[in-house]
Amino acid sequence: MLKRKWINIFLGVALLLLIVIVSYISWFKINSNALWNIVNTQCIPLLPTTLPCLKVEQEKHYVLFKDKKGPLHNLIIPTEKITGIESSQLLEQHSPDYFAIAWQERGSLSQQTNHPIPEHLLAIAVNSQYGRSQNQLHIHIACLKPEINKTLNQLSSTITTHWASLSSELAGHHYLAKKFPEGSNHVENSFHQLNEYVIKHHDKMGNFGLAMVQLKDGSKVLLANRLNFGDLNLGSAGELLDYQCLANQ
């Protein structure tokens, strides 16, 4: 009897877990195009722009979008259907450099506050294929969390122009880091730079989240976070961001 009782409990828990998983998958399928639908049906055809569309650059193929999560949180979204960081379209020769565009638009946050935000507090990030809720590429523009900003500046002297593991975790997860060459004013081809690492290690772009920051010394740094289910890490580089920008208050 006792054995049967435990079997029934196990089966009940397994059934409940299955229901939760199926419900989540169904929800994701229904809602994963919500962001694209807003951009495609509101931002692009309806000009002049109105919230949540801050800017529509059709010739440059992107929309600057005000995210409802937090007062200081914008997105760069392509005007074409591109699923995310795993898309081969991002590596094509004539594809817009959406990561560089997001970096150029980071100043848009200062326009939304009475307290101009210093460069070293700003960051951009894109999540992995498994760490996002939307199947349309969207690059987050926000502030760094204060503790992340502090850690990165402490590690500045250890970060080189080659991909290498940081000696300290960020947000409880392992990150790779790479500096742009000293004095470089260009931040192009960030997706290509990550892809070089991915190819070398026989990996996949979709497994990685990617972020970019500027340290207090002016150096620009790429950060990559690889999916690791065992570490409860979905490759969400957005975990480094603070949509309230507490560091600037």
Image (cartoon, helix red, strand yellow):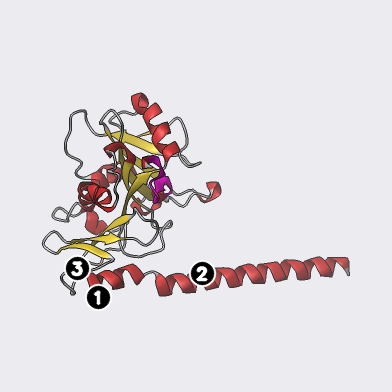
Question: Can residue 202 be seen at all in this image of the molecule?
Answer: no
Outermost residue on the left side: it is 59
| Amino acid type, residue under disc 3 in the picture | Thr
- Earlier in the chain: of badge 2 and badge 1, it is 2
Task: Give the labeled residue for mark 1.
Answer: 41
| CA–CA distance in space, label 2 to label 1 | 26 Å
The structure residue drawn at horizontal position 24% and vertical position 73%, both measured from the top left corner, is 42
| Secondary structure under the numbered disc 3 in the rendered image | loop
Outermost residue on the front side: it is 114
- Magenta span includes 12: no
| Amino acid type, residue under disc 2 in the picture | Tyr
| CA–CA distance in space, label 3 to label 2 | 33 Å
Task: Give the labeled residue for mark 3.
Answer: 49
Task: Give the labeled residue for mark 2.
Answer: 24
213 with respect to 31 (left or right): left
| Amino acid type, residue under disc 1 in the picture | Thr
Disc number lying in front (3 or 2): 3
